Structure formats: structure tokens, C-alpha cells
Image (spheres, helix red, strand yellow):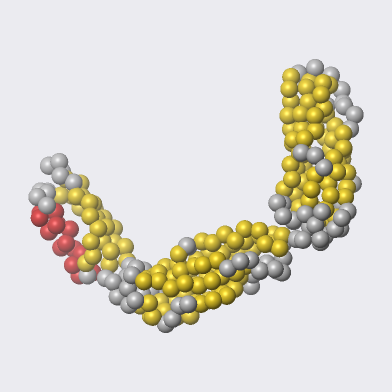
Amino acid sequence: MYLVEYHRAILHHQCELSETSSYEPRELENALPDIARLRGCNHPRNYGRVLRYTVQFYPLSVQFGEQRVKTSSSQTTMFVENNALTTVTLGSVSIQGSDFSIAQNNCGTTLARNTGCSLEVVFTPSATGGRAGSMSVTASDSSSPHTAALQGTGISNGIGTLSSSTLSFGTQKVGTQSKPQQVTFTNTGTGTLTLSGIAISPRLFTQSNACGASLAAGAHCTVSVQFAPTLQGLLAGSLSIQDDGSGGQHTLVLSGIGQ
């Protein structure tokens, strides 16, 4: 069976028709004009599209968010749905991507029309950073497997914390540079924190640091910031530190007045 979604634009009469109905494939060619005549629509110009009923996952994409490396997320429920008019035969459900696994599979070998079955999926990242996978199942309605996307982010056991969220430089003459102000970045987590970058903008703010590529648990480093205005008025900027811990990016708001 097919799902037929068709629309009509009438050339000579202000008569419009929009419906969704089910037909056998051999009925498609004749069905549209017949229904138009039954509705009293003369001289219809027909156009439409044919959508085949399919088995599908719900949702089609799952985002697990952040998860510490080598620990498992809570279970997320996914469904295999049969929107067809007849029972379908299901093959095995499989996972592509070693960071994802099926904790519970409640799907059998058949799925009745207009019903679904559930699966419980977990995310266990093997490394930090974005992780991707997919879930697939074969069914008798199609020669191609049905798929759903799986995504998550692995994070370390480190937790980065800034000693302040803002730095204010007050008034500074244009063309001169302020004395440095400092902020401390500490790893308050239980594992090593890897730093992937420290950036500052715009160019009227500059930074120097001794943070290195990583911080052990409990360790800290200092970032020094200076303000050198090239314009008069209230000026703003930001410093960001990117790491592989929870939250990932830490932002320090900067401000000063050029005089």
C-alpha cells in the first residue's frame, strides 16, 4: 500500500482539493481525476507525490549531550514504528559506533500495523570530544535498512573554574596600555583537564598565560590581561578558555573606557 498525498489547482473554476488517501499502486493513475469529479471540480490540473508507507525509528536523531569518558549515560528510549497497513517482519536491530549500545531490546521479529516497539540505548564514550554512531534495522517493507543518528560528547573528569567572570579596567588613555590584571583558572575536578585553547578579542585586549596543555586535578594557572584602547568610549571584549571538561568553554567578560 502507498500513501498518496495529492493537491489540485483548478484552471477554470475556483475549486481546490487537498486530501490524503490510500490506494494500491495500480489505482494511482485513475484515482486523482475521479475524486476531483466527485468533488465537482472541473478541468483540474493535477500534481502530487506518492509516499510509500515505511517503518521508521522515532526519534530519527538522538543527542545524548555530555558524558564522562568510560561512564554510561542513563538509558534513552527509542521506538521502531510501523506506519504501514500490514504487519512487517523485522530483522535484528544493530548499532554502528562502539560508543553506543542497546541496553534493552523489546522488539520481536514482527510488528503489526500502526504499532511500535521500544529499545533502550546508552552512550559510553571511549574518548573526549564529539562521538557519533547510528542504529539500524531491516524490515520487510524496504530493501534498505532504516536508520537513526546517535550523537554525544565525551568529557574528562576535569572541571575548569575561573576565579572571576569579569575584569574591568576603568579609564585608560588611547594609545597607552594598562597594567595587567590577573585571573586564575583552576581544575576543580578529579581528573586531568586538557586545554585546547585560550583566545581573546578584540585586539585592544591582550593576554599572556602559563597554563600549558593540561592541568592536573587541583592544579591552577594564571592568565594576565591588558587593555590598550585605540578608541574613546566604553569598550568591551572577552577571553575564552576551551577544555575537555564539563561545560567545555569558559568566558571572561572584559571592559574598559578609552579616553
Residue 119, above or below 205: below
- 133 and 249: which is toward the camera: 249
Task: State which quadrant residue 102 falls in.
Answer: bottom right
Q: Position of residue 106 (x, y in %)?
A: 48, 77
- Residue 196 visible in the snapshot: no
Question: In front here: 8 or 98?
Answer: 98
Q: Residue at x 78, y 26 (%)?
A: 256
Depicted 220 relative to depicted 200: above or below: below
- Where residue 72 appears, as percent x and y from the top left, is 66, 69
**Left or right relative to 14: residue 212:** right
Q: Residue at x 57, y 75 (%)?
A: 103
Q: Quadrant of the N terminus?
A: bottom left
Residue 51 versus residue 231 in the image, above or below = below
Q: Is residue 118 left or right of residue 169?
A: left
Question: How far across and how far down the image is residue 152, in percent?
Answer: 62, 61
Which residue is nearer to you in this view: 230 or 257?
A: 257
Residue 104: x and y in percent read 54, 76
Q: Residue furthest bottom?
A: 109
